[in-house]
Amino acid sequence: MPDREIVVDNFAGGGGASTGIEMAIGRSVDIAINHDPAAIAMHRANHPGTKHYTEDVWKVDPAEACEGHQVALAWFSPDCKHFSKAKGGKPVSQKIRGLAWVAVKWAKAVRPRVIMLENVEEFQDWGRLTADGRPDQAHKGETFRRFVGKLEKMGYQVEYKLLRACDYGAPTFRKRFFLIARSDGNEIIWPDGDYDDPDSLETAVGMKKPWVPIRDVLDLSLPCPSIFDDSDTIYRKYGIRAVRPLAEKTMKKILQGVEKFGGKPFLIQYHDSAEFRGQDLDRPIATVDASNRYGLVRFLTEYYSSAHNVSIDRPMPTATTHDRFALVETDGMDIGMRMLTPRELFSGQGFPADYIIDTDADGKEYPKSEQVKRCGNAVCPQVPAALVRANLPEICTKGGVMHETP
């Protein structure tokens, strides 16, 4: 009987959890499972020592895959979009919401010492659906409690919490639900993050480090095409995705950001009626209400969202599977705007700078849309790294393989 314990990453995606686990244990996970060939292609490129299954998680036999090895850790990140509030009021799939039950299958088949599960915070509300495919508020959380109860009846101690990636060193505020279940009788440990708000008392006295700002991982040398220039020259030269044409409400939000981060009055005569006095939107700014003494101003705007503009001196809001964030620059005479690149998005999620995102394991080009999708679905590596170090120190290398935030 093999005596080496192994680590398994179900719903492995592009490799966020696997990367975090590797930071802690000093080697790749042993098994990675995902139904999406594109996701496995990225995972294979970055974790070549892993045994990969491009398969529905329900079709993989845990005992057969583990080949007699004890499982130290089984990680699960089931599809979250049919729990997320971002889904809005649209009908959801009971089948997809039920993917988390595969953790119980693994618990029965190979009894991992530790099970960890990550999802959106609404996972705790998991319950039955109404006839029209919407969550039944009368049974909110009913299925989640049954899921936890199943693990507890099998001898697992179960705890869960909401954790923010920024508190563990990732330059994003991304908050997620984490569940830990263990069958070996050892205590479940929730490690405190080493990072906090720069304005907090703990940071001020040196007990914690300040959050990593998104500014630290942006490539500020890349040009931001003018929002008034229809030329695609910069796009062709740098591959930067400009944002044009701009809707009126988008322009209004940009100018609100300029005013917020650059001082007021600042650029042009802009009014609540959303009119631009004395010029058309397709022409360079002609009217300046104040002298240009503010220097270069940069901030992020969430392009396909009504959310507010955000400072690049703070962690980034949660990335999604679609292009969402744009960098806005102004020097007082013009306004530039571009979507963040996939590399910036991955770095914003806490991935190491050398993580391969543009080609797969066979050297095939990985489309930018797929890169963005993988990033939006990814677990921020710093959180699993911290959880594994705290709960499974016996399988971790001394200090782990610590990737600094790029």
Image (tube, grey):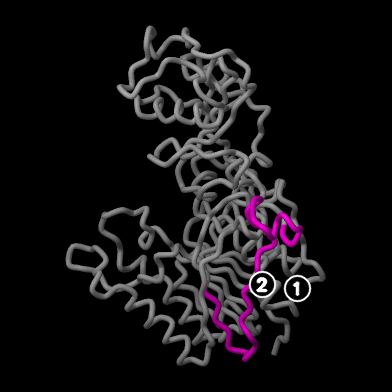
Q: Which is nearer the eye, 281 or 238? A: 281
**Dot 1 crowding, Cα within 10 Å, few <14, some 14–19, many 20+:** many
- Three-letter residue code for mark 1: Cys
Question: How many numbered discs?
Answer: 2
Left/right placement of residue 144 relative to residue 74 reads: left
Residue at x 65% of width, y 60% of height:
168
Eyeballing the image, is 202 above or below 373?
below
Q: Which is nearer the eye, 169 or 333? A: 333
Disc nearer the start of the sequence (1/2): 2
Magenta stretch bounds? 179-208
- Residue 388 tag number: 2
Q: Which is nearer the eye, 285 or 349? A: 285
Mark 1 and mark 2 residues within 8 Å of each other at the beta carbon: yes
Q: Is residue 333 magenta?
A: no
Which percent across, then down, holds residue 159? 52, 80
Which percent across, then down, holds residue 126? 35, 71
